[in-house]
Amino acid sequence: MRVERVPFRHIGAAAAVFLSACGQKPAAPPPQAFEVGIVTVKPATVPVTTELPGRTSAFLVAQVRARVDGIVLRREFTEGDEVKAGERLYKIDPAPYVATLNSAKAALAKAQANVATQDALVQRYKVLVAANAVSRQDYDNAVAALGQAVADVAAGKASVETAQINLGYTDVTSPITGRSGLSQVTPGAYVQASQATLLTTVQQLDPVYVNLTQSSVDGLRLRRQIQEGRLQTSGIHAAKVTLFLEDGRTYPQTGQLQFTDVSVDQSTGSVTVRAIFPNKDRVLLPGMFVRARIDEGVNDKAIVVPQIGVTHDQKGQAVVLVVGPDNKVAQRQIVTAGTYRDSWVVDSGLNPGDRVIVNGVEKAKPGMTVKAVEATLPAPPASGAQAPAMPAASAAPGAASAPVAPAPSSAPAAQ
């Protein structure tokens, strides 16, 4: 008997017809898991900076006031020019003070002559009293008169010195080296020492102070991070400060932090932080509004996440999608503490080793099973291209930078 071999494709077709006749469909292939790009969270070293508003103030301020009464004869400086310490600014009429000095000198000469007379009398009485030629009372009176004459000489010297000082005050000089302000009096004006008449103001502008205002909450957060060992700093006096002017430009010179006030202003809840800057070219003037960025230290245990992996929920809270050990997606709420380059600095909500989705965020949903692959991210910008980390107080949770288009997903197209 001859047996013919039936082709395998015919058998498969017959089986399909048979199953179709029985009401059963062939099993579909299992769906392929959606592929997402992830980054594994690792501790990173991030500089900690604080950006604060403030105003400039002069390093030294001297109010030049009248110290004697009199008429201003002339002004000997140009308003707004640099003046040296000891340079004469005003001349007050010295005539009455010259007369007072001459009178004091004459009184001193009279007292000195009286001392010579009384001393000679004491010397004669000293011999006579030994021979009982004069009474002891007369001798004692002569000694007392000599002492009074010596005291008159001392008083006369003090009067001469006072008169010389007052005469010197008619030359109104600058107590410091700096830039002069507006003159408050003109030649011919009458000034009084009793009222301390203001003549002008001299301010030293190199270096210059910058008084900054920091909230007590930010200061508390900074101290807590230092105590926990999350922040390393080389000391308050070594912290560098970068200044931004009113027109947005960066001041070319860097400053140093001098001190932080130890008391909190009860009306504003803030503390004063003072920095000092060189000001050789006199770019900074007292009263200017500026912003300063203080380099406070380095956080070598910071958790950073690329900005493209952070979204916000309906309440405006920052959230990320994390791939668990079972390859299922879970949503995490995070608290950010600013930005560093192209990443968010996460204060809480993530731990080292967590896998955060950065590619395919728009398609991944919580509870979905995905295939996680390491994402390929663009190189971060250079250190000088973007400011370092901003404090949480300066960057609102929802104030992320312009959205960045995610990298195209490598998931295969649906069949």
Image: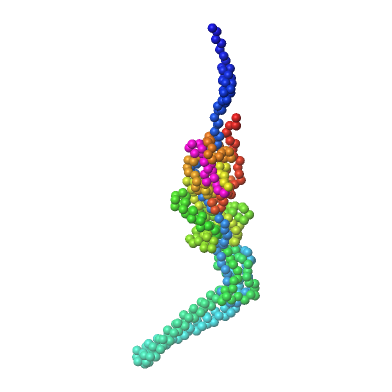
Tell me what residue is drawn at x 55 percent, y 27 percent.
27
Q: Choose between 344 and 69: the one closer to the eye.
A: 344
Is the C terminus in the top left, top right, bottom left or bottom right quadrant? top right
Quarter of the image where one finds residue 75: bottom right
For residue 117, side relative to residue 173 (left or right): left
Tell me what residue is drawn at x 57 percent, y 61 percent.
57
Quarter of the image where one finds residue 381: top right
Q: Residue furthest left?
A: 131
Q: Choose between 276 and 109: the one closer to the eye.
A: 276
Tell me what residue is drawn at x 39 percent, y 91 percent.
138
Is the N terminus in the top left, top right, bottom left or bottom right quadrant? top right
Placement of 67 over or under 332, stated as above or below: below
Q: Choose between 188 and 330: the one closer to the eye.
A: 330
Placement of 367 over or under 97, stated as above or below: above
Q: Choose between 173 and 373: the one closer to the eye.
A: 373
Q: Is residue 237 visible to the viewer in this orientation of the structure?
A: no
Q: Residue furthest top?
A: 1
Residue segment shown in magenta: 315-333
Placement of 117 over or under 321, stated as above or below: below
**Residue 214 part of the magenta segment:** no
**Residue 321 part of the magenta segment:** yes
Residue 362 spot, x, y in % from top left: 59, 40
Residue 367 spot, x, y in % from top left: 53, 39
Q: How is the image coloured?
A: rainbow
